[in-house]
Image: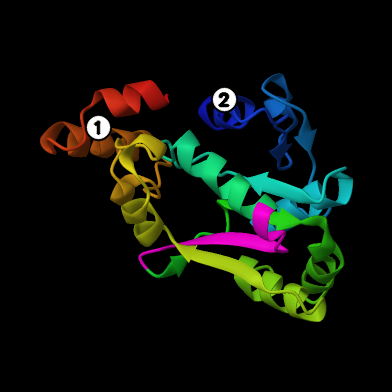
Amino acid sequence: IEHALDLLRGLGLEPRICGSRDDLARFAPVIRDHHPGCGPLAGVEAALSISDTDLNLFVPVDLPLLPAGFLRWMVERAVATHAVATVPLFAGRPQPLSAIYSRRLLQGIQSALAGGNFRMMTAVAPAAASLDEPIDTFHVESIAAALIPEAWPARPAVQDWFRNVNTPGDYEELLSHLEQNPFHPISCLQEAT
């Protein structure tokens, strides 16, 4: 949680935590789900419902190697395109929890939740379509390869940016992976935490 919040603060943003755990308020203000038990989409809906900005960046807490440079670039892209959603694709799969959503999607997301659709992309796509607005998607690997090294983080390697770490065992496995791979110095995780 602290790492994700630090990433957002480093971008000059005021982070908030989506969820129903009041004990997390010691880290940042908590936005309680209006639909508890309905997954991340309910958190996005709650956040968009109180947001005072059009574009809102969402960052999951279980991706410790997601670099600030990538998030900064994604924010710049979202501002430039003004798309209703900016969603990275990694290994061909959408990463809807590391994305930017416009408040303009709120009504469509609320309709999806009311209809029992709790999956991020199957809710966001119709919400965007109802506004006749496209979703901006991009392949992370292509973007990372195209940008000059000075503009893009060299560590950790792009294939680890979306590696989930949810348990102490996952964390130990990640540390082992970083130690065994010479292209991933262990210091990159220590810098990120």
Q: In the image, which residues are magenta?
A: 80-91
Element type where label 1 sits in the image? helix
Instruction: Say which residue label 2 marks.
Output: 6
Task: Identify the residue at image location x=24%, y=39%.
Answer: 173
Asked if residue 39 shows in the view, the reply is: no
Amino acid tagged 1: Leu
Image height check: is 47 above or below 107? above
Task: Identify the residue at image location x=30%, y=37%.
Answer: 154
Foreground disc of the pair 1, 2: 2
Instruction: Say which residue label 1 marks.
Output: 175
Give the mark, 1 or 2, whose residue is nearer the N terminus. 2
Q: Position of residue 79 (x, y in %)?
A: 69, 51
| Dot 1 alpha-carbon crowd within 10 angstroms: few under 14, some 14 to 19, many 20 or more | some
Quadrant of the image containing the N terminus? top right
In front: 22, or 148? 148
Task: Identify the residue at image location x=61%, y=31%.
Answer: 11
In front: 35, or 122? 122
Q: Position of residue 21 (x, y in %)?
A: 71, 35
Drawn side of residue 37 relative to residue 153, left or right: right
Task: Identify the residue at image location x=72%, y=34%.
Answer: 16
Asked if residue 162 shows in the view, the reply is: yes
